[in-house]
Image (cartoon, rainbow, N blue to C red):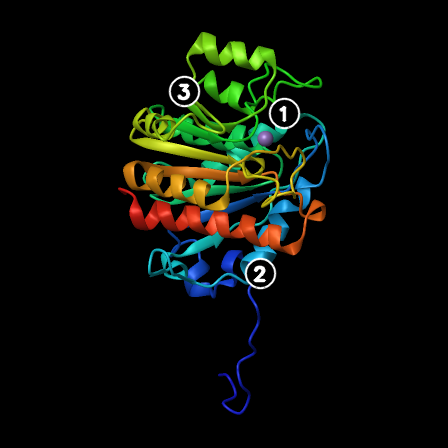
Amino acid sequence: MPDPQIPPVPWTPTNFLALPPEQSSLDSAAAVLIPVPIDNTTSFRPGARHGSAAIIAASAALEDYDLELDIDVAELGIYTSPPLEPHVGDPYQMVERVRAAVSHYATQGSGKLTGVIGGDHSASIGSAFAHLDQRPDLSVLYIDAHADLRDAYQGTAWGHGSGARRIAERCPISLVGVRTLALEERQYIDHHHIPTAFWPPHDQSDLDNIISGLRSEVYVSIDLDVLDPAEMPAVGTPEPGGLRWLELTGFLQRVCQDRRVVGFDVCELAPDLGLPAHSYTAAKLVYKLIAYSLALGPR
Ligand SMILES: [Mn+2]
């Protein structure tokens, strides 16, 4: 029996959004987050291995109440898994490790929205594959400053420069935000008719066409470098001329209203390359994606 003379100790939970057990247990959660602290395939500036921990730490400062949607996001229930152990011997083994972790939670019928917090963007491959294993009719929406369509880069076919290519070999993929790419990638887009909204878009219809081309169930992969470096410099490969925060969240809101988002990843935060505000921005993007998917979308 607790001693009524001793007040309960107010521990701060260390999960996403610092939720108490009743809002963060796996049973009660509508969303699952899996931290994947890897950056061994990063090609320019490393540091994304610290991204997931920084996002979870920053998320403690987010308000549970979301003004835009007028809902309490904590009430949705969010379970944060322990961080996945990196495999640094072979990038393909890491893909398989992410695939196994996501499959563990995203089983058919669980109904839970399953998200990966990177880590470098190679985490998207295993995560998307896990969903595709169970939902072969999925579309993948790949939001990134880069096309990630190289067949291989720096000696591996399973690194962060080839994520969209590996996914495109298995299912329809649409790209948004691309503003730099190799000739090989440009030719792949043209030859395979990959729907792509380059940035800046020609007009609003570019994004309308991306959404209308998506199947009813969608996996969303976000490389934070799609944002303009003015708002998100804490990434390994910053690229000028990107989306602003309101452009990205406005687009995601439309996607989540029109399609059933079943899984996602948010990758490439390298917190030591930016300010605390940038980790907070990344945490808020994860929060918005969960809220839009669960509160707005068909489920
Ligand atoms: Mn990128």
Q: Which residue extends farthest top? A: 191
Residue at point 58% right, 60% down?
Answer: 14
Q: Nearer the viewer, residue 3 or 24?
A: 24
Q: x%, y% of residue 75?
A: 37, 61
Which amino acid type is marked by label 3? Pro
Image height of 89 relative to 232, above or below:
above
Ranked by sequence position, the earlier of labels 3 and 1 is 1
For disc 2, the neighbor class at 10 Å (few under 14, some 14 to 19, many from 20) is: some
For disc 3, the neighbor class at 10 Å (few under 14, some 14 to 19, many from 20) is: many
Left or right of 259? Residue 82 is: right
> Element under label 2?
loop
Which amino acid type is marked by label 2? Thr
Q: x%, y% of residue 271?
A: 67, 48
**Marks 2 and 3, Cα distance to the nearest angstrom?**
39 Å
Residue at point 57% right, 54% down?
Answer: 280
Which amino acid type is marked by label 1? Gly
- Report which residue position mark 1 lands on: 159
Q: Which mark is residue 41?
A: none
Q: x%, y% of residue 168?
A: 46, 18
Quarter assignment of residue 227: top right
For disc 1, the neighbor class at 10 Å (few under 14, some 14 to 19, many from 20) is: many
Residue at point 33% right, 29% down?
Answer: 208
Residue at point 47% right, 15% down?
Answer: 169
> Element under label 1?
loop
Q: Which mark is residue 14?
A: 2
Quadrant that contains the C terminus: top left
Q: Is mark 3 within 8 Å of ligand 1?
A: no
- Report which residue position mark 3 lands on: 195
Q: Choose mark 3 or mark 1, whichever is in front.
A: 3
Q: Choose mark 1 or mark 2, whichever is in front.
A: 1
Ranked by sequence position, the earlier of labels 1 and 2 is 2
